[in-house]
Image (spheres, helix red, strand yellow):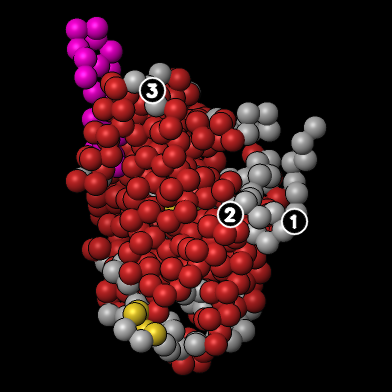
Amino acid sequence: MAKQFIFNRLEFSGSLGDLGTILPLALGMVLVNGMDPKGVFFCFGLYYIFSGLYFRVTSPVEPMKVIAAYALASGITATQIQASSLLIALVLFALGGSGIISSLKNRMPIAVVRGVQLSTGTLLLMKGLQLMLGTSPIQLVHELAEPYLSIQSIGPLPIGIVLGAILSALTLYLYDNSRIPAAVSIVTIGLIVGVIFQHNVVADSLNFQPSLPNFLPYGLPTATDFSFALLVLVLPQIPMTIGNAIIANADLSASYFPETGKKVTGRSLCLSMAFANFATFFLGGIPMCHGAGGLASRYRFGARTGGSNLIIGTIFIILVLVFGQNIQAVLHFIPLSVLGVLLVFAGCQLSLTILDVKTRQDMFVVLIILGLTLALNLAAGFIVGIILALILRSPRLSI
């Protein structure tokens, strides 16, 4: 019988796979939307640990991207984000508790699942390249390739491109090396660079501040906050959560862990996210999910068991307990280009799931979902993809 919890360098390496998604979005929401860093990262740590203990295989934890993207773009308030956590939790609890999500998952055309996985992988790849090129929103706001480093270029090249190219080559070289895991190596090198070339503002704000997250740190949202969150944040997020965090994730987990991953079902993922977002409502976190891209990244960098979740979850909680409100200063020591490398390889790994698509009709659906995702959003691609896949089942139509 396979071990359910392993603690070794490969599990540690894979545990870092979500950082490329978590850190830019979470730190951005702390800076732009006034989210409490203690609550944000404590909730991530708790969710990692409980996910690992329950699922017993490596399980991703990420911000809900539609909500995070809109929050960063529009600068909405912390209470509106808090309201969205409670509302999305109620929706997910209804879907999972009623069994609707299981019925939906069983009837989902495989072409739609592959389309969601390719689209998510492509978005991760693009985001990773932006972080390396210095064109992500947080870098554009600061007008710096690496806002938290004192060095911005080496000769004519931005430091992000130099770091990204070197670490990408190193990742390829170490991709299947079990003795020297790739993710651990590139994050370690990134931290060394961050320490050597630390920005004075970051260094000055780094000090011990032992504390726990506050209960309801933003107070209770108003009725206006809830109505705004429902219409603007939650309703656009639901299709992406169903498509990517539930259906695509369950499919990918079944492929990776056919024997040990039987607890990872559409219903269990739905209820897991529901309980997690109830907790974030009270502790000041941000809406969280189980993204398929994070699973692909964690698996590719070596994580296989729930041990990887316990490792990274414990790290986050210890950082909060030791540094408290200053945890963001600690995390700023990891250059953004390092996170970009993690995202690029996560995106490629997830995108390669389309290799089992055999028919022209299925590939057509996959490409339409990808195109709509890039032109509009993943929710639109998911909905149109379902409709198109059902239409193409007719024998009168051919591609």
Residue drawn at x 50%, y 92% is 204
Seen in the image, is 206 located left or right of residue 120?
Answer: right
Looking at the picture, which amino acid does disc 3 mark? Lys
Looking at the picture, which amino acid does disc 1 mark? Asn
Which secondary structure, mark 1? loop
Q: Which span is picked out in magenta?
A: 378-399
Q: Mark 3 sits on what residue?
A: 358
Q: Position of residue 6 (x, y in %)?
A: 75, 49
Mark in front: 2 vs 1: 2
Image position of 291 with respect to 335: above or below: above
Q: Mark 2 sits on what residue?
A: 175
Q: Is residue 72 magenta?
A: no
Q: Earlier in the sequence, mark 3 or mark 2?
A: 2
The answer to whether residue 227 shows anywhere in this view is no
Per the model, the C-alpha gap separating discs 1 and 3 is 38 Å
> Disc number at residue 214?
none
Seen in the image, is 165 located left or right of residue 184?
Answer: left
Seen in the image, is 319 located left or right of residue 290?
Answer: right
Residue drawn at x 28%, y 28% is 365
Residue drawn at x 37%, y 40% is 118
Q: Mark 1 sits on what residue?
A: 8
